[in-house]
Image (tube, rainbow, N blue to C red):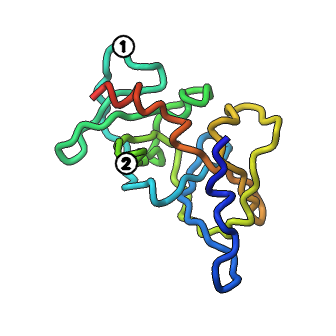
Amino acid sequence: MDTEVLKQSDVSADGTTELLQLVSFNIGTEEFGVDILKVQEINRMVEITKVPQAPAYVEGVINLRGKVIPIIDLRKRFNLEVKEHDKNTRIVVVDIGGNIMGMIVDAVSEVLRLPSDTIEPPPELVTGINSEYIKGVAKLEDRLLIFLDLSKVIDVSEVAALV
């Protein structure tokens, strides 16, 4: 498992703990986070054009300021129950290794600045979401946040071939 983010020097040169910035979002009752440097923008839901023979978790494509980008439904990707989109549903546009794509999430929560030492590697036995997708688990005051590894969540070669 890739835990580079967790192994980067937890203490900066001046002795303080390094801060990570994450965009947090919800899918069902769970809260997830991704590195803010991978997030380009967050948009309201728009009409999505279906793509024939795409993987089941790919909703289709959208036109984002003249560029066609694939849209992934994270509920489908994580094998969770599909639900109707509502006023809180968002498309989080991310850059994964130079490939721009969108992820449908139930709601975007906030931008968090967390000390890197609050993020622990995922436990050995993780139920529900495939543990290979998880970079770590952040311990917040009253909740846990699952820190996702986008390069493992989205098969870039499979999705990029659609556009």
> In which quadrant is the N terminus drawn?
top right
Quadrant of the image containing the C terminus: top left
Q: Residue at x 31, y 20 (%)?
A: 51
Dot label at residue 29: none
The number of discs equals 2
Amino acid on which the number 2 mark rests in the picture:
Arg
Q: In the rendered image of this protein, does residue 151 appear above or below residue 55? A: below
Tell me if mark 2 has few (under 14), some (14-19) or many (20+) residues whose alpha carbon lies within 10 angstroms of its own: few
Residue at the limit of the structure toward the bottom, as seen here: 14
Where is residue 162? Give x, y as percent: 31, 25
At horizontal 62% and vertical 38% (from top left) the residue drawn is 133
Judged left or right of residue 68, residue 107 is right
Q: Which mark is residue 53?
A: 1
Q: Earlier in the sequence, mark 1 or mark 2?
A: 2
At x 45%, y 54%, the residue is: 38
Work out how far the residue at label 1 is from the one at label 2, CA to CA, in angstroms: 26 Å
In the shown orientation, is residue 10 left or right of residue 41? right
User: Which sits in the foreground, 49 or 86?
Assistant: 49
| Residue type at the position of mark 1 | Gln
The quarter of the picture where residue 101 lies is top left
Q: Few, some or many C-alpha atoms within 10 Å of disc 1 (few <14, some 14-19, many ≥20)?
A: few
Q: Which residue is depicted at the point 72% across and 59% down?
A: 119
Which element is circle 1 on?
Answer: loop
In percent of width and height, residue 32 lies at 62, 49
Which of the pair 24/122 is nearer the observer? 122
Mark nearer the viewer, 1 or 2: 1
Residue 92, x across and y down, in percent = 43, 48
Q: Which mark is residue 44?
A: 2
Left/right of residue 37 with respect to residue 145 in the rendered view: left
- Residue 123, located in which quarter of the rendered image? top right
The quadrant holding residue 132 is: top right
Circle 2 SS class: strand
